[in-house]
Image (spheres, rainbow, N blue to C red):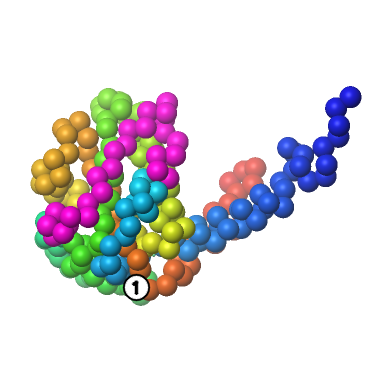
Amino acid sequence: MAEPEPAGTSHRQVSGADLAAFEELYRLQATQRAMRRLHPDPVPREHLERLVAAATRAPSGENAQPWAFVVVTDAETRASLGRLYRQLTRPALWIVARVARSESARRIQRSASHLGEHMGEAPAIVVVCMRQAYPRWLRATRVGQWGSIFPAAQNLLLAARALGLGSTLTTMHLMRHRRLKRILRIPRRYQVVAVIPVGFPKGRFGEGERRPVEEVLHWERW
Ligand SMILES: Cc1cc2nc3c(=O)[nH]c(=O)nc-3n(C[C@H](O)[C@H](O)[C@H](O)COP(=O)(O)O)c2cc1C
């Protein structure tokens, strides 16, 4: 006869260790924010490899794993990316500044402006690329396509947080996508979906402003 399982190890019960793991994960998730002010000190290569390893553990539709990552640490290439990003953010954020209504929107605008001017000084820039796994014209597959890359990007941001590294997901580059691809020699069949500066943060990790759970959680029916 099978031995009964000791209390707390049942598969139908969340163990104390699991709960503690959740609490720690939640703390990291809650304080994983857009950190746009970064120290220029280099990030050790093994940490950058850890970030990409974490990213590649993400789920993807049909396990297509359509990702590739270009990690840029070379000063000259970072400067080229920095120049490109500055050209884009100046006019875009000028417009945003004119329409930002709330104090929170103005704060994001100021912080994004700072990154706009200093992207090239981030010690590492991770460029997240995506291979088109489904036909572009098939509307039903679009969610599957984009949904197969952002979990990887989020894993990377969260891994950075766990290592005490600051990062921010940015998409502004999409306005100069071809130029960006040329600088980094990204093959035709890949597109860039996110540019993520990574470095040790100048500020502290606080909690981001998020809508309360009660506002968005519905039980059984909306
Ligand atoms: C799809 C997406 C695109 C984003 N693009 C940019 C961007 O181009 N530039 C930037 O500075 N931040 C960008 N962000 C960061 C958001 O502004 C940030 O996550 C949001 O304001 C919450 O900030 P917090 O985590 O500090 O509370 C982007 C975030 C996401 C998810």
Residue 47 magenta-highlighted: no
Q: Quadrant of residue 118?
A: bottom left
> Relative to 102, is 171 on the left or the right?
left
Quadrant where the N terminus sits is top right
Query: Going 29% across and 38% down the picture, which residue do you hit?
Result: 68
Query: Going 41% across and 33% down the picture, which residue do you hit?
Result: 60
> Relative to 59, is 105 on the left or the right?
left
> Relative to 6, is 175 on the left or the right?
left
Asked if one can make out residue 93 in the rendered structure from this viewpoint, the answer is no
Q: Quadrant of residue 99?
A: bottom left
Whether 66 is drawn above or below 40: the answer is: above
Q: Position of residue 154 (x, y in %)?
A: 41, 49
| Residues rendered magenta in the picture | 53-79
Q: Position of residue 189 (x, y in %)?
A: 20, 31
Residue 67 magenta-highlighted: yes
Q: Quadrant of residue 182?
A: top left
Residue 149 or 71: which is nearer the viewer? 71
Whether 154 is drawn above or below 30: the answer is: above
Whether 62 is drawn above or below 127: the answer is: above
Asked if one can make out residue 73 in the rendered structure from this viewpoint, the answer is yes
Q: Local crowd at mark 1 within 10 Å, few (<14), some, or many (≥20)?
A: some
Looking at the rendered structure, the secondary structure element under dot 1 is loop
Query: Going 71% across and 46% down the picture, which residue do you hit?
Result: 14
Q: Which residue is mark 1?
A: 202
Residue flagged by tag 1: what amino acid is it? Answer: Lys
